[in-house]
Structures are given as C-alpha cells and as structure tokens.
Image (cartoon, helix red, strand yellow):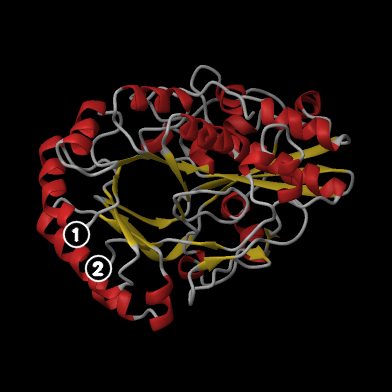
Amino acid sequence: MITEVRVAPVALPMGRPFVHAGKARATTASVVVAVRAAGHEGFGEGAPREYVTGESLAGAVEALRAFGPERLNRMVDVTDLDAALRALAELDLPTVVGGARPMPAAAAALELALFDLVCRIHGVPGSEALRRVPGVADMLTARPEPVAVSYVLDMAGDPAATVERLEAEALRSVRHIKLKATQDIGDCVRRAEYVRGKFAPGATLSVDVNGDWDRATALRAAHALRPLGIAWFEEPVAPRDWSAMRAVREEGGIPVMLDESCWGLDDLDTAARLGAADLVNARVSKCGGVFATLRLIRHARGLGLDAQLGVHVGEVGPLWAAARLLSCSVGRLATVEAGKQDEWFPTPLTEPPYRVDRQHYLAHPLEGAGLGPVPGPALRDACHWTVADGRAHTRHDSDSTATTYGNSTGDLS
C-alpha cells in the first residue's frame, strides 16, 4: 500500500533562456510528486502553464496536496500490476484532480508518479508496462527503438551562430527543423531560407507561432513561406480561432498543427469537423499523463490527423523521461521533440542524466524500471517538499477561463 505522498514546486535557473513569440523562459516551473510504497518510490512531474491550460504552479501544488495515501490507495492497488495499470489508463485524472476546472499538468505529475511506482514495485520497464494495458499494444513498435528528434531553433540569439556550432554529421542527420516565429514575416523568411540552405535537402521544416499571429499575418506568412516547402505551421493564430486556422490551410496552402488549441478529444473533434487542422502536438503534461497522451494520439489518427510527440521547455526529469518512453515506443509519429536539458541545465538533474545523441540527432530508449531516471542531488535539493495530507486546500489557479478542457476519457482500444 502507498504510505507517503510528497509534492514540491521546482524553480531552477536555466543555462540560457528559451525565447519564442513574445515570451521567454529562463527558469523552470514544474511540480514534482513522489509516492512511496513497499520500499520503492515513484516520481512524476507536471509543467503548469497558465497560457496553455490555465494552471499555475501554486495551484497545482495545492490541488495535489489533497491526494494523500488513503485516497490514492482507493484509486489504485499498487500490489496488483495489471489492475493498477488498467486503473491508471481508465481514470480521467485531470477532472479527478481539478474538478470543474480540470488540471492536466497536475494530473500528469500524479499519474507519472503512480505509474513509475507501480512499475518499480514489480520490476517492470515502462515500455513493458504499456504493452500490458488493453488497447495500447497495437500503437507500439515491436520493441523500444532509437528515434530521430527534431532540431528546434528558438529566437534567442543569432540563428547562424547557433547552427554553425553543429557538426557536419548533425546537419546531415537532422530530419526535421522547428523554427520559432516572430511577428516580422521578413525575418521568418530569412531564417527559413538560411535553414533550408544548411540542413540536408530531405529535412522537413515547420514554423511554430505559439498563437502569436492574427489571421491576416498568418495568411501573409503562408504566401511568403510556402515556396520554401514549409511542412506545417504550429498554432499559427490565437488558440481555437478555428476559422482562421481553416483559412491558413485552404487559402494559405499550409497545413496546421494544433498545440495550445488542443488539450483533449473534444478539441480534436471540433478542429476536424471545421477543417481546421492536419496534425496535433501531443505533450504529456498538456494532455494529463501518458495514457491521456496515448488516447489523444489514437483519436487523432482516427480523425485522419497526424501527431507530434512534443515537450515543454525546462522539464526537469520525469516529464522528459515519460516523453522518451512514448517517443521510442509509439510508431508512426510525425516528429518527436526531446528538449535541450543538456543545454539548459549544466548540472544533470537526474540519475542517469539526460542524454541525446546530438551528432545523429537520435534519442535512445531509457533503461530501468518505470520511467527509468530518478532525481539526482541537484533536483532533490531544489524540491521543497510538503506532505500530501489528503485534505482539500485553497486553489491558486489562474483566473483565465478562456479555454475549456474538452477531454472525455475516450477508449484506448
């Protein structure tokens, strides 16, 4: 049985800021959950972002403190591997945690901690655990495999100086480049032309706008960038401006990937019905955990949409490990992101440390039970733990109600 649950906010300085569309992040903002049972400890993480899901870091911490051992033991029997995995796959944790205002990032932290714990108790790697869940195995490759990861070029500094640091083998190996956009369309064109001239001709190129363009700007950008063979625009206009997204696709001739516009299945249904999307960016924290992410990918494919496995900037450990688990196990993903923890955190935060083959731009499967890595000394020192006592606490969420979480649990089968 679960005997202890702890929750901690984590704010760590990053080695360099990550800049996009009027926003810059130089400090992490994660909530970490640790759950203990039978001499084992599982770790989970969520990345609350008010501009994505309306969650604040303080709100996520307070909500999770209501999930003490007694409550979690009623939800999940950690002594029974298959029953525990089925329970986690079937739970609508964002609603369980947040109620009328679901909290997917907080839910992701709790789900990952429970998934990691259950796997560690039973000595099972995360990839094997996923195969035991009904309706999941057919989404997975025969075994976890190295996966090609995207090169993300943000707006911090001169792109030429950044790209010039890459080795020749990396320039040949990168299969997809994601270029962060600005309001200056001419600058976007120059950056895209530069990238086109540096990387292998077969590499695809997308432009991530983070919802920063209006309809007119997006159409102007589409006409200017289309000759460069842009694979898609990611979130080209304000979230859920479905008519503008459809115009980008039909009038601008550029496919559209949803990100901030899509938390769950209802969003996908709406976008598909209105002809507003071609792909979706599935991020573990935004979706509400591993199983919610798998549901989103399956649902997207059923609607004829492709999926990217994305990350949040500054993930400190369990989140990037969960994304690595999915990216190396789920077949037929449009692209995969792996983050840049090796650039952002000079001191490794996990044991074993984050690692990507930057010469060939490959991410390899992680080893060990559960999610694999555990917090290292630097991350443990940054965690200011409080014990989850099972009582309801005051919520400190953003007052933003611009988005409605549309995510019925759906069916993994």
Residue found at the very far top of the displayed protein: 100
Disc 1 target residue: 228
Contact? badges 1 and 2 (CB < 8 Å): yes
Q: Name the residue: 60% across, 57% down.
A: 382
234 relative to 374 in the view: left or right? left
Residue type at tag 2: Arg
**Neighbours of disc 2 within 10 Å: few (<14), some (14-19), many (20+):** some
Q: Is residue 110 visible?
A: yes
Q: Is residue 184 visible?
A: no
Q: Position of residue 171 (x, y in %)?
A: 37, 75
Q: Name the N-terminal-most of marks 1 and 2.
A: 2
Q: Residues within 10 Å of mark 1 (few under 14, many from 20)?
A: few
- Residue at 21%, 70% (x, y): give it: 194
- Residue, x 26% and y 70% (percent of image)? 159
Identify which amino acid the numbered label 1 is placed on.
Leu
Residue 320 position in % (x across, y down): 56, 54
Establish if 158 lies above or below 8: below
Disc 2: which residue: 196
